Amino acid sequence: MKKGIFLLIFLLGIFSSMIWFGCSGKEDISQYTPVEVPVSVDGDRELKSICKKIADAAGRKNFRSLEKYFNISREERALIKFEQKRDPVKEQLELLSGHAQLLKEDKWQVFTMEKNGSVRILRVETGDAGQLSIVLVKRKKGYRISAVKLG
């Protein structure tokens, strides 16, 4: 009986030390953090085109023409409307219309992700020390709006 208890304590100690040493090794997680890199709009004709369309819609204060540029299919949009009783595209367009006076091409900062060159982020400073970001994703037929968000 004493040998069984001793063996159980010994195995428990080995198991505990394996967990301790396994969890104490620090891994550099900074390699997984997305890094934004500033880019220029000059060389990308398709990016200039979508930026101009957004700026023109902001000048007219009518963003309905941008609905077709969102990266969401009609079926997905209808499903979200049915299940969640909200329209994600309209919500994002309302956010754009709330900040229409800021959406001028010369005020934008354009970024891309270091490890994903198909993503572009148009960012403009809002008056309350925040930022309005428009995330664009490059597809075969040009850029599509993936998200519009504050922050």
Image: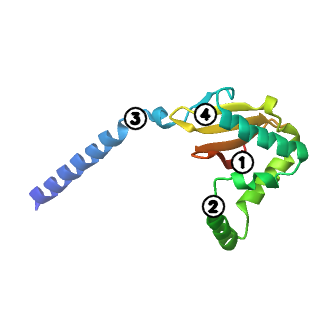
Q: Which residue is mark 3?
A: 27
Image vertical order of residue 30 relative to residue 11, above or below: above
Q: Amino acid at mark 2?
A: Ser
* Residue nearest the viewer, comparing 150 with 37: 37
Asked if labels 3 and 2 touch by Cβ distance under 8 angstroms, the answer is no
Earlier sequence position, callout 1 versus callout 2: 2
Q: Mark 4 or 2, which is nearer the eye?
A: 2
The residue lying at 66 percent from left, 67 percent from top is 80
Q: Which residue is mark 1?
A: 148
Q: Amino acid at mark 1?
A: Val
Q: In whole angstroms, how far apart are the C-alphas of marks 4 and 2?
A: 24 Å
Earlier sequence position, callout 3 versus callout 1: 3
The residue lying at 74 percent from left, 55 percent from top is 67
Image vertical order of residue 44 relative to residue 143, above or below: above
Disc count in the image?
Answer: 4
Q: Is residue 148 left or right of residue 35?
A: right
Say which element carries label 3: loop
* Residue nearest the viewer, comparing 93 with 60: 60
Q: Amino acid at mark 3?
A: Glu
Q: Which residue is mark 2?
A: 73
Image vertical order of residue 121 relative to residue 79, above or below: above
* Residue nearest the viewer, comparing 8 with 57: 57
Q: Tell me, for residue 112, which label it has, or none.
A: 4
* Residue nearest the viewer, comparing 139 with 32: 139
Q: In whole angstroms, how far apart are the C-alphas of marks 2 and 3?
A: 39 Å
Earlier sequence position, callout 4 versus callout 2: 2
- Quarter of the rendering occupied by the C terminus: top right
Q: Residues within 10 Å of mark 4 (few under 14, many from 20)?
A: many
Q: In whole angstroms, how far apart are the C-alphas of marks 1 and 2?
A: 16 Å
Say which element carries label 2: loop
